[in-house]
Image (spheres, rainbow, N blue to C red):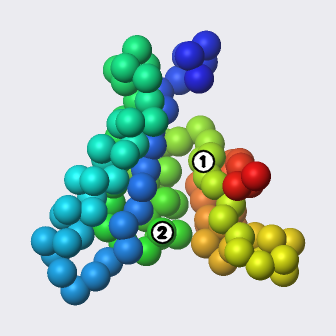
């Protein structure tokens, strides 16, 4: 990432609840967690975003809004069948994204 000339935007999606205050706390905590993943020397080239909503819609909308060149996301599958097919979020992002999607498996 340090040798790439591109800006990197990190996004965490918080699922909606009935408690707006809880959502705000989760958004703030998510941004702090994202900041902790990035070395200080790179923070000027990284955007930190947390949004409330359904992950598929938010990921695709943010990618379009930011004119993303690529989406990189973790593939979190729980069972063997899901591992073979990825999760529903993963597949839905793949099919609905406005740009290429690169999946990184958990292990």
**Residue tagged 1:** 71
In the image, residue 41 above or below residue 8: above
Residue drawn at (13%, 71%) of the image: 21
**Residue tagged 2:** 55
| Image position, residue 38 (x, y; %) | 44, 30
- Which residue is more in the foreground, 14 or 5? 14
Name the quadrant containing residue 97. Answer: bottom right
Circles 2 and 1, Cβ within 8 Å, touching? The answer is no
Q: Is residue 39 left or right of residue 73?
A: left
Judged from the image, the secondary structure of the residue bearing numbered disc 1 is: strand
User: Separation of disc 2 and disc 1 at Cα?
Assistant: 13 Å
How busy is the neighbourhood of tag 2: few (under 14 within 10 Å), some, or many (20 plus)?
some
The quadrant of the picture occupied by the N terminus is: top right
Residue drawn at (52%, 69%) of the image: 56
- Which residue is more in the foreground, 26 or 93? 26
Residue drawn at (19%, 72%) of the image: 22
Q: Residue furthest bottom?
A: 18
Q: Earlier in the sequence, mark 2 or mark 1?
A: 2
Q: Is residue 42 left or right of residue 24?
A: right
């Amino acid at each position: 990432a340090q040798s790439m000339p591109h800006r990197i935007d990190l996004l965490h999606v918080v699922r909606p609840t009935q408690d707006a205050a809880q959502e705000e706390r989760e958004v703030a905590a998510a941004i702090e967690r994202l900041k902790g993943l990035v070395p200080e020397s790179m923070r000027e080239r990284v955007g930190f975003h947390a949004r409330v909503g359904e992950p598929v819609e938010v990921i695709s909308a943010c990618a379009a809004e930011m004119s993303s060149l690529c989406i990189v996301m973790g593939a979190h599958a729980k069972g063997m069948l899901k591992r073979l097919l990825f999760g529903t979020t993963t597949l839905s992002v793949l099919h609905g994204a406005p740009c290429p999607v690169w999946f990184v498996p958990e292990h």
